[in-house]
């Protein structure tokens, strides 16, 4: 799976986790779940954001490596 595919998948997953967090907060406000459910949803959201940042960083490093390998930015 390419980095772009992984990034797209993580973005979709992040969107679903944002909805999950909203629902967990609403359920907590109505007393249907404990605050632990909200914290767990937040933890999942933050972990996915971190993964997305890591993937974007890896893509940028790859782009820079390719640019350099093709002679970009080389000065003598």
Image (cartoon, rainbow, N blue to C red):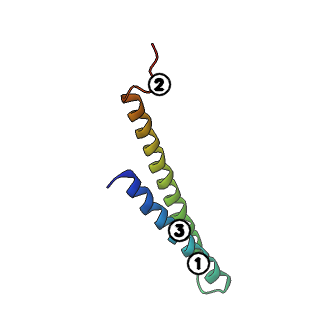
| Marks 2, 1: nearer the viewer | 2
Choose top left, top right, bottom left or bottom right for residue 22.
bottom right
Q: Label 3: which residue?
A: 15
Identify the disc placed on residue 73.
2
Q: Which numbered disc flags the more N-terminal residue, 2 or 3?
A: 3
Q: Which residue is mark 1?
A: 24
- Residue for point 38% across, 57% down: 5
Query: What kind of element bears circle 2?
Result: loop
- Name the residue at 49% across, 62% down: 11
Q: CA distance from mark 2 to mark 3?
A: 37 Å
The secondary structure type at the circle numbered 3 is helix
Marks 2,1: beta carbons within 8 A = no
Is disc 1 placed on a helix, strand or loop?
helix
Mark 2 is surrounded, within 10 Å at the Cα level, by few (under 14), some (14 to 19) or many (20 or more) other residues, namely few
Q: Earlier in the sequence, mark 2 or mark 1?
A: 1
As drawn, 38 above or below 33: above
Give how far across and how far down residue 49 sits, in percent: 53, 57
Q: Quadrant of the C terminus?
A: top left
Position of residue 71 measured from the top left corner of the image (x, y, whole percent): 39, 25
Q: Considering only vertical position in the picture, is 70 above or below 29? A: above
Location of the N terminus (image quadrant) = bottom left
């Amino acid at each position: 799976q390419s980095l772009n595919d992984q990034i797209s998948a993580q973005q979709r997953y992040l969107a679903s986790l944002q909805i999950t967090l909203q629902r967990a907060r609403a359920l907590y406000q109505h007393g249907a779940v404990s605050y632990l459910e909200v914290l767990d949803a937040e933890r999942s959201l933050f972990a996915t954001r971190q993964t997305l940042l890591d993937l974007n960083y890896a893509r940028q490093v790859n782009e820079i490596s390719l640019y350099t390998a093709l002679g970009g930015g080389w000065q003598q």
